[in-house]
Image: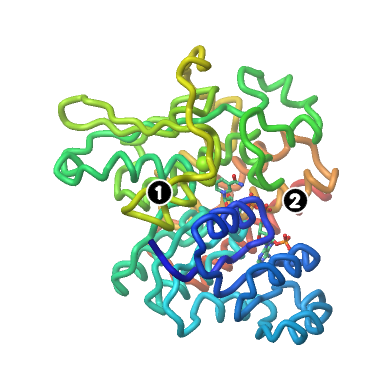
Amino acid sequence: MYKNIIVLGSTGSIGTQTLDVCRKHNIRVLALSANRNTALLEQQAREFRPEYVCVTDTQTAEEFAPVAGELGIKLFKGKEGLVELASLKEDALVLNAVVGIAGLDATLAAANSKKDIALANKESLVTGGQLVMDAVKANGVKLLPVDSEHSAIFQCLQDHESAKSLKKIILTASGGPFFGFDSSRLETVTKAQALKHPNWSMGSKITIDSATLMNKGLELIEAVWLFGVKPEDVQIVVHRQSIIHSAVQYADNSVIAQLGSPDMRLPIQYAITYPERYDCPAPALDFYAMKDLTFERPDPDTFLCLKAAMEAIEKGGLYPCAVNGANERAVQLFLEDKIGFADIGRVVYKTLSHFNFQGEYTLKEVYETDKKARAFVDEQLLK
Ligand code: NDP
Ligand code: MG
């Protein structure tokens, strides 16, 4: 078990659940970060007494200075501050629970400063997968998945002899609140409906991604990078109950799955205690209480974000980064009531045919692509 942890995005849904796990196992929290929620950050700082904090929103950071002073905590500010946290000289696991491409630099910085990474920030792999995997390999660090599906796959691959004959990954999807809807019904759904996920309570961006199925598209790309498989070797299966968190199929067609209650503290804890297992705050499954476990096909022709992500990873290069950038901007506009729900899928899909981004890339090109994709969304939807 890691003894020290740096929690990036500690005020979010994954961040607060990570602190639950730290509390339970007395893990030393070396550093915390928030973007703007300094009220919660202060509460966390008073409880965990970290040595460092970062407030990424520079204006808000100034407001936190008196608290940091009183508690004797070193305060870092802005995007650069997040990178400094990920590169601290102390030996610690970096758990990255920042939302969006804003987490990429910190993932790279953690790897380059030889720190193992527990990754919730799937956008790091979606936007800069090649760069992240190169940095992880070059520095010989561990990249431990926090996303429940990827944690499940990782757990199913712990039989290292069998893992050599991996044939296929079965990536399960809850289907979100609008599963079974056709395109015309998607036109009329509201923000309140989209923000209500049937099985999980999460941050607003990933909740919308779950409703559009972009989340599953991002997870497909994440799986391709994490497990070194081809996109066609990942089968997405809608499993409404979110009990089977994903599965793997080996050469002999044996399928090994990981099951558990829908509670992120289990995959978070496994990333921290790997390869050991301990008592966990997540409740145990009650097989007598479970009724049906169902399996269905996803519908990418209706959920265009999923289609865009599937095509983007097939095309490779910076296509995944472009669809991610378009999605981040479109979700932001939807949450600000500036566009409709169905606009998200339409514009994300359109981004694919608008750009040509094949081949290898640099970090600078990642950010340029992200910027172009966001500008394309504004141009299309805010005329
Ligand atoms: P939240 O929105 O709940 O939390 C995001 C965290 O990142 C907060 O601490 C927030 O600070 C901080 N943050 C926001 N914007 C920035 C920025 N520009 N720069 C730096 N920090 C920022 O998100 P979740 O916890 O739901 O998700 C975090 C990541 O984990 C995402 O990549 C998501 O896809 C992934 N994930 C989440 C799951 C879940 O169950 N929630 C499941 C699987 C993966 P502040 O509070 O101050 O705004
Ligand atoms: Mg997931």
The disc placed on residue 212 is: none
C-alpha gap between disc 1 and disc 2: 38 Å
Q: Nearer the viewer, residue 49 or 267?
A: 49
Task: Locate residue 248 relative to residue 380 in the image: left or right.
Answer: left
Badge 1: few (under 14), some or many (20 or more) residues near its Cα, within 10 Å? Answer: few
Q: Earlier in the sequence, mark 1 or mark 2?
A: 1
Where is residue 297 drawn, in percent x and y?
Answer: 47, 20
Q: Is residue 297 above or below residue 103?
A: above
Residue 311 at least partly seen: no
Task: Locate residue 127 relative to residue 48 in the image: left or right.
Answer: left
Coloration of the structure image: rainbow
Q: Is residue 371 above or below residue 320?
A: below
Q: Is residue 73 above or below residue 22?
A: below
Q: Which residue is mark 1?
A: 278
Q: Amino acid at mark 2?
A: Gln
Task: Locate residue 261 relative to residue 330 in the image: left or right.
Answer: left
Q: Amino acid at mark 1?
A: Tyr
Where is residue 215 drawn, in percent x and y?
Answer: 56, 41
Residue drawn at x 69%, y 86% is 72
The quarter in which the N terminus is drawn is bottom left
Disc 2 under 8 Å from ligand 1? The reply is no
Residue 272 at least partly seen: yes
Q: Which residue is mark 2?
A: 332
Q: Nearer the viewer, residue 48 or 340?
A: 48
Residue drawn at x 70%, y 73% is 56
Badge 2: few (under 14), some or many (20 or more) residues near its Cα, within 10 Å? Answer: some
Q: Quadrant of residue 346?
A: top right
